[in-house]
Image (cartoon, rainbow, N blue to C red):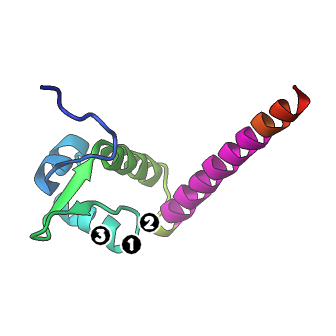
Amino acid sequence: MTVDQHPDRALYAISVASELTGVNPQMLRAYEDRGLLRPQRTAGGTRRYSNRDIDRIQRISALLLSGLNLAGVAQVLELEAETDRLRDEVDQLRRTAQQGDS
Protein backbone atom coordinates (compact mmCIF):
# COMPACT_ATOMS: atom_id res chain seq x y z
CA MET A 1 0.00 0.00 0.00
CA THR A 2 1.31 3.47 -0.87
CA VAL A 3 0.63 6.63 1.06
CA ASP A 4 -1.12 9.40 -0.86
CA GLN A 5 1.55 12.06 -1.38
CA HIS A 6 -0.74 14.68 -2.94
CA PRO A 7 0.49 18.09 -1.71
CA ASP A 8 -3.01 19.07 -0.56
CA ARG A 9 -3.65 15.96 1.51
CA ALA A 10 -4.06 17.05 5.14
CA LEU A 11 -1.59 14.93 7.10
CA TYR A 12 -0.25 16.88 10.06
CA ALA A 13 -1.74 18.01 13.35
CA ILE A 14 -0.85 21.53 14.49
CA SER A 15 1.86 20.21 16.83
CA VAL A 16 3.57 18.37 13.96
CA ALA A 17 3.22 21.37 11.61
CA SER A 18 4.78 23.49 14.35
CA GLU A 19 7.67 21.09 14.77
CA LEU A 20 8.27 20.81 11.02
CA THR A 21 8.32 24.57 10.48
CA GLY A 22 9.64 25.94 13.76
CA VAL A 23 6.55 28.16 14.07
CA ASN A 24 4.71 27.86 17.36
CA PRO A 25 1.05 26.77 17.32
CA GLN A 26 -0.16 30.18 18.50
CA MET A 27 1.42 31.81 15.45
CA LEU A 28 -0.07 29.18 13.17
CA ARG A 29 -3.48 30.08 14.60
CA ALA A 30 -2.69 33.79 14.07
CA TYR A 31 -1.77 33.09 10.43
CA GLU A 32 -5.12 31.36 10.03
CA ASP A 33 -6.96 34.26 11.72
CA ARG A 34 -5.28 36.65 9.26
CA GLY A 35 -6.32 34.49 6.29
CA LEU A 36 -2.73 33.56 5.42
CA LEU A 37 -3.37 29.87 5.99
CA ARG A 38 -6.42 27.65 5.61
CA PRO A 39 -5.73 24.24 7.15
CA GLN A 40 -8.36 21.60 6.65
CA ARG A 41 -10.48 20.56 9.62
CA THR A 42 -11.52 17.13 10.79
CA ALA A 43 -15.16 16.46 11.62
CA GLY A 44 -14.27 17.33 15.23
CA GLY A 45 -12.70 20.65 14.22
CA THR A 46 -9.04 19.67 14.60
CA ARG A 47 -6.70 21.48 12.22
CA ARG A 48 -4.84 19.32 9.69
CA TYR A 49 -2.00 20.71 7.61
CA SER A 50 -0.89 19.50 4.17
CA ASN A 51 2.57 19.59 2.62
CA ARG A 52 1.40 22.64 0.65
CA ASP A 53 0.46 24.29 3.98
CA ILE A 54 3.92 23.47 5.35
CA ASP A 55 5.52 25.10 2.29
CA ARG A 56 3.30 28.16 2.75
CA ILE A 57 4.24 28.44 6.43
CA GLN A 58 7.91 28.35 5.43
CA ARG A 59 7.25 31.07 2.81
CA ILE A 60 5.49 33.20 5.43
CA SER A 61 8.43 32.73 7.82
CA ALA A 62 10.91 33.78 5.11
CA LEU A 63 8.90 36.91 4.33
CA LEU A 64 8.67 37.81 8.03
CA LEU A 65 12.43 37.33 8.38
CA SER A 66 12.95 39.70 5.45
CA GLY A 67 11.25 42.43 7.50
CA LEU A 68 7.63 42.34 6.35
CA ASN A 69 4.77 42.42 8.82
CA LEU A 70 1.75 40.10 8.48
CA ALA A 71 -0.14 42.63 6.34
CA GLY A 72 2.84 42.85 3.98
CA VAL A 73 3.10 39.07 3.88
CA ALA A 74 -0.58 38.86 2.95
CA GLN A 75 -0.05 41.28 0.06
CA VAL A 76 3.01 39.42 -1.23
CA LEU A 77 1.19 36.08 -1.10
CA GLU A 78 -1.79 37.58 -2.89
CA LEU A 79 0.44 39.04 -5.62
CA GLU A 80 2.28 35.73 -6.01
CA ALA A 81 -1.03 33.89 -6.40
CA GLU A 82 -2.20 36.43 -9.00
CA THR A 83 1.09 36.09 -10.88
CA ASP A 84 0.68 32.31 -10.95
CA ARG A 85 -2.91 32.66 -12.18
CA LEU A 86 -1.88 35.07 -14.94
CA ARG A 87 1.05 32.84 -15.95
CA ASP A 88 -1.36 29.91 -16.29
CA GLU A 89 -3.71 32.06 -18.36
CA VAL A 90 -0.89 33.14 -20.70
CA ASP A 91 0.23 29.52 -21.10
CA GLN A 92 -3.32 28.49 -21.98
CA LEU A 93 -3.61 31.32 -24.52
CA ARG A 94 -0.32 30.29 -26.10
CA ARG A 95 -1.47 26.67 -26.40
CA THR A 96 -4.75 27.83 -27.96
CA ALA A 97 -2.87 30.08 -30.43
CA GLN A 98 -0.49 27.25 -31.36
CA GLN A 99 -3.42 24.92 -32.01
CA GLY A 100 -4.96 27.57 -34.24
CA ASP A 101 -1.71 27.85 -36.21
CA SER A 102 -1.62 24.11 -37.00
- Which residue in the structure is indicated by mark 1? 34
| Visible residue check, residue 5 | yes
Estimate how packed mark 1 is, as few (under 14), some (14 to 19) or many (20 or more) residues with alpha carbons within 10 Å: few
Q: CA distance from mark 1 to mark 2?
A: 8 Å
CB under 8 Å between discs 1 and 3: yes
Q: Position of residue 62 (x, y in %)?
A: 42, 46
Whether residue 23 is visible here, answered yes or no, is: no
Boundaries of the magenta span: 72-93
Q: CA distance from mark 1 to mark 3?
A: 6 Å
Dot 3 lies on which element?
Answer: helix
What is the x, y in percent for residue 93? 78, 43
The answer to whether the residue labelled 1 contacts the one labelled 2, judged by CB atoms less than 8 Å apart, is yes
Label 2: how many Cα within 10 Å (few below 14, some 14–19, many 20+): some
| Residue located beneath label 3 in the image | 30
Residue 63 falls inside the magenta stretch: no
Tag 1: amino acid: Arg
Q: How far separated are the C-alphas under marks 3 and 2? A: 10 Å
Please tell me whether mark 1 sits on a helix, a strand or a loop: loop
- Pointer 3 local density, CA inside 10 Å: few below 14, some 14–19, many at least 20: few
Vertical placement of residue 94 versus 27, above or below: above
Viewer-proximal residue among 80 and 101: 101
Name the residue that disc number 2 marks.
70
